[in-house]
Image (cartoon, helix red, strand yellow):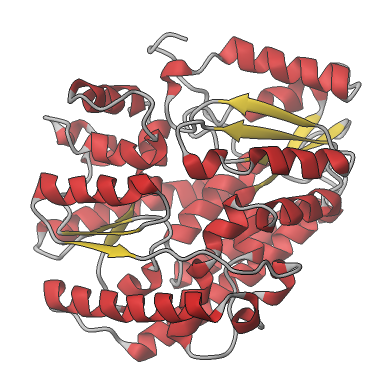
Amino acid sequence: MSEAFRGKASVKRLQTSVRATAYQKEWFMGLKDRVARGEPLAFVNADVPQEIFRAMDIPYVVNQWWSSVCAAKQMAPYYLGLLNERGYRRDLCRYCSLSLASAFDPEPEKGPWGGLPRPSLAVTRITCDSQAKIFELWAQTFGIPFYALENTVPIRVPSKWWELVPYDWEECFDRHRLDVAEEDYRGLIRFLEWHTGRTFRETQFRAIMRRVNEMAEYFRKTRDLIAETVPAPVAVTDTMQTVMISQWQRGTDWAVETAKSLYEEVRGRVDRGESVCPKEQARLMWLGRGLWFNLGFYQHFEEKYGAVFVWSIYLAIAADGYARYGGDPLRALASRFAGLEDMLHMPPWNSDWIVKEAKCHRISAAVHLISDSCTQGAGGTYFIRKALEDAGIPVLQLRADPVDARAWDESQAVAAMEQFLEQRLGVRPL
């Protein structure tokens, strides 16, 4: 595929999605103003406890969020080209390194929404070998302090973790994992107080944790409503971006109101009998990260086959993975992230959960986007496929990068999808 490939934007059915997309630009411009006035800016990875930064009123930008914005704005080929010109391999993990690539732009103001402001500190969690090096390079590039949170591995696998984590999270996760994470978070708080001069506010932190629970409750209601409604009232293109924008604003009143608005709008569509495809022929799940440079890809199959992608990890993990009730709030936060990567990327944590979700949503088949450059995203794919197919759910594996359009072959991907729908599912064009 030519590097001039331009992805298709998805058609938005929900006003909540329209408002959320507009809000993220407004929020980002406000963040840039704050940094211009001398406030600190933290650059953090997705699995860093952002609730701590919010409780200290420290503005932050999430690595993977900025990568998805760059990809959606069709800037990824240019930025990744800058990375490669510096001698970095083309097959590096692009999802996590794209933001670093944007930092090498000699004209950063030409980036999305005027470009990313200069960060004043960087924080990651060492969940793979690349993370520490990527953030170390951030620190070297800007001459800023860097904090690395430890990662731990489970000794045991709980049965049906999704039923345990809201209230019985102390039982769900090994004690050593919570102890390490809790102590690490106290170290992070000291690091932030030292480098920013700001104070961790316990009362504010508790309010943030309550609001995150409220948001998760609305996401759970939305997920369950979509699962039980046939034909589907909405598709993943209606929920993915809204959920992710809300997640990066986790703990705010705006995020809670947006999650509530999403549920009420989906509820309204169900009550009015509105659906994506009245002649729905297949319900699909999209495994892996979103195809951020080409979200319109999903809607081709709705229009031609009545095949609707009704499930993605974004709404599903927001519904099952984040709520925490009771106990010390900092330790509860430690439990939120101690096992998050296991839930998403480690069989049987992820494979058991995905099969559960597939059955609840009455999924006809799964499409799994595999990025070979990401050890986390590619890990466990054999076991996920086996678990689903053992449950009678066919799986199509597509190999592509979620943010790098340079190697994306649109015609090949569409052909593989259409062949899969017609030959494995027996679906015919409408």
Q: Residue at x 21, y 39 (%)?
A: 114
Q: In the rendered view, would you say 113 is above or below 332?
A: above
Name the one closer to the observer, 109 or 352.
352
Q: Is residue 179 left or right of residue 280?
A: left
Residue situated in front as seen by the camera: 336 or 312: 336
Residue at image position (85%, 55%) is 228
* Looking at the image, residue 196 lies above or below residue 45: below
Where is residue 79? Give x, y as percent.
27, 28
Report whether residue 25 is seen. no
Q: Where, by quadrant of the figure, is residue 111 drawn? A: top left
- The residue lying at 78 percent from left, 40 percent from top is 386
Instruction: Judge whether 156 appears above or below 347 on screen.
Output: below
Measuring from the top left, give residue 25's x and y in whole percent.
35, 48
Give the percent coordinates (x, y) of residue 223. Answer: 72, 57
User: How many marks do you count on the picture?
Assistant: 0
Q: In this view of the protein, can residue 6 be seen by the observer?
A: yes
